[in-house]
C-alpha cells in the first residue's frame, strides 16, 4: 500500500520536483507531519528526505486525524499519508497530492503520478503486510499455505476489496518475501538512525 505525498495548497507547489526545490533552497524551514515516531508516515518522510537530499523537520502527532488536520490548518507543510485516508481531502481541495510512493500508480488515486514519474525515481515507500510462520514449519506446509493465499488474493472479491483500499497484491514466493523483508529492514534502519542523529 503506497503512501501519498501531500501538501497544503497554500504552499504554492504543484509537483514533487517543486517541493524538493523549495526544500533544498531553505533547509530546515519546512515541516512534515507524521502519526508518531517510528510509524509508517515517519519512515516515509525520512526515506523521502534521503532520496531527495532535503532537510524537512519532522513533527509527530498522535494519529492520522491530528496529522491531517495540522497539514490542512497549515501548521505543517507536508504529510506522507495513506492514500485512502487522504483521498477525500484531496478531492475537496483541502490538500494537494504530489505523488504516490510506489512504483505503480494507486488504483485509489490513478490520476496521481508515482514518485518516479514525478521526477524522484529513487524514492519508494510502501506499507506492506505478510504472513509469517514459525522457523521450523515444514516446507510442504509453507507451500500449501502459500498456494491457498495466492488463490485468495487472485479472487475477484479480494481484488475488489484491495482496489478500494488502494492496495496492490504481491504474489511473492516465500524466499522472495524473506529477501524483501531483509532489504526493508536494512533501508529503514538507515532512515531511523539518520532521524535519531538529527534529533540529538
Image: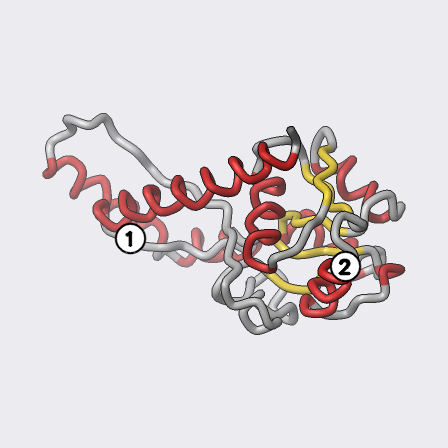
Q: Residue at x 72, y 56 (%)?
A: 6
How many numbered circles are shown? 2
Give the residue at mark 1: 172
Image x and y of residue 119, in percent? 60, 72
What is the x, y in percent for residue 147?
22, 48
C-alpha distance separating marks 1 and 2: 32 Å
Residue at the (79%, 54%) spot, across then down? 89
Front residue of 149 and 97: 97
Residue contact between numbered discs 1 and 2, judged by CB atoms under 8 Å: no
- Residue at horizontal 72%, vertical 29%? 62
The residue to which callout 2 is attached is 90
Under circle 1, the secondary element is loop
Give the image location of residue 66, x and y in percent. 78, 35
Element type at mark 2: helix
Left or right, 179 with reference to 158: left
> x, y (%) of residue 166?
55, 55
Front position in the image: 88 or 177: 177
For the residue pair 194 and 137, the one nearer the viewer reads as: 194
Q: Earlier in the sequence, mark 1 or mark 2?
A: 2
Amino acid at each position: 500500500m503506497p503512501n501519498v505525498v501531500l501538501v497544503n495548497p497554500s504552499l504554492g507547489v504543484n509537483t514533487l520536483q517543486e517541493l524538493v526545490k523549495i526544500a533544498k533552497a531553505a533547509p530546515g524551514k519546512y515541516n512534515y507531519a507524521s502519526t508518531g515516531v517510528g510509524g509508517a508516515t515517519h519512515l516515509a518522510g525520512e526515506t523521502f528526505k534521503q532520496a531527495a537530499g532535503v532537510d524537512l523537520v519532522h513533527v509527530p502527532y498522535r494519529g492520522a486525524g491530528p496529522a491531517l488536520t495540522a497539514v490542512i490548518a497549515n501548521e505543517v507543510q507536508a504529510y506522507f499519508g495513506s492514500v485512502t485516508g487522504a483521498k477525500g481531502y484531496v478531492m475537496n481541495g483541502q490538500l494537494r497530492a504530489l505523488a504516490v510512493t510506489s512504483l505503480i500508480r494507486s488504483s485509489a488515486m490513478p490520476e496521481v503520478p508515482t514518485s518516479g514519474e514525478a521526477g524522484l525515481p529513487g524514492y519508494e515507500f510502501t506499507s506492506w503486510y505478510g504472513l509469517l510462520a514459525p522457523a521450523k514449519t515444514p516446507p510442504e506446509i509453507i507451500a500449501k499455505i502459500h498456494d491457498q493465499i495466492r488463490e485468495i488474493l487472485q479472487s475477484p472479491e479480494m481484488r475488489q476489496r484491495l482496489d478500494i483500499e488502494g492496495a496492490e497484491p504481491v504474489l511473492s514466493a516465500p524466499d522472495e518475501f524473506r529477501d524483501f523483508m531483509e532489504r526493508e529492514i536494512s533501508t529503514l534502519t538507515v532512515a531511523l538512525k539518520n532521524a535519531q542523529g538529527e534529533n540529538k
